[in-house]
Amino acid sequence: MWNKLFGGKKKEEEKLALPSLPAGFKQTISNSLGSKAIPVLPDSAQRIFMVVTDPDSQALDFVAAIEGDEGLSSKIIKIANSVYYDRGNGSQSVVEAVATIGTNELRNILGASTLSALFPSTHPLRDQLWEHNVAVAVFSRELAARKAAGRENEAFLGGLLHDVGKLLLLEINSTQYEMILKKAGRNGSFTAEEEEVYPFNHCELGQFIGELWNFSDELKMVMRLHHDPLEDLQRASLPLIVKAADLIAHKLRIGFPSGLTTLQNNASLKVFEALEKLEISSDGARNLIKDFGKLFDEEKERLQMA
């Protein structure tokens, strides 16, 4: 199971290489942010990420992972007893909660809950970034179901993680990152505005975090490449799926204020190109985007409980 998330064997067509960041560049990031700025991935979080991305995980695997974290155990029992899941019997234990929620729903809830706990900023912008990440996760899962069957769980986690660099920069200096976001909305580029302030951008920082947390190459590629040109991304690969999901979320204006006009207009232009590369026609793309908007409205309250 460990290898599923942390660099295990892949099929031939999935063997994608991502060079590690140069040691000097890693040191530059550490010097800029501070050596203790990036949170250490706890053992409990590693276990959760393993379970949620392994398609072979059984209910008892979820129980074991959840019971290793007392706070998470209480949260999952509370969620199981919410109006969304409770069937009138009530859950008193993790075993009962897992049975009530079901493993498919738990994958999404646990992934979101674990990552959210690592970046607990109370700044209002954090909620906006998080809503966007959750939307990208949901849309990535749905695109994977259509174009990369069997990889839905990894796609969901990739969607959650794609902007982890932004979450960290907001955590470190919320006022500064709010200014970056406003400028990016007008100029149409997060990375360019980040590089005006830092000697790196959130994509490079995301890869650095992925390396420190020992994630698989493809998850690190999602974190690093989701702002790369579409022509550079392999057809039906996880990075392309997450990039398309990201563009859909921007087009639907999920998670960001309406003032980010240039950024959102750019996404509206690029999203059809991204979906075409996934072999989805223009008419199909329009219907899909509309359906995804409705789907997120249905799912966001449940996922926000995480």
Image: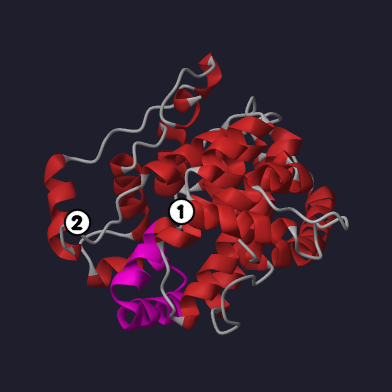
Amino acid tagged 1: His
Q: Residues within 10 Å of mark 2 (few under 14, many from 20)?
A: some
- Residue picked out by circle 2: 29
Tell me which residue sits at (30%, 80%) in the image.
Answer: 176
- Residue picked out by circle 1: 227
Q: Earlier in the sequence, mark 2 or mark 1?
A: 2
Which quadrant would residue 170 be assigned to in this image? bottom left
Tell me which residue sits at (35%, 33%) in the image.
Answer: 18
- Our reading of the magenta stretch's main secondary structure is helix
Which quadrant would residue 144 be assigned to in this image? top right
In space, the residues marked 2 and 1 are separated at their CA atoms by: 19 Å
Q: Secondary structure at mark 1?
A: loop
Q: Position of residue 238 (x, y in %)?
A: 56, 38
Quarter holding the C terminus is bottom right
Amino acid tagged 2: Ile
Question: For this view, does 134 lie left or right of residue 185?
Answer: right
Question: For this view, does 235 lie left or right of residue 170?
Answer: right
Tell me which residue sits at (60%, 41%) in the image.
Answer: 155
Q: Secondary structure at mark 2?
A: helix
287 in magenta: no
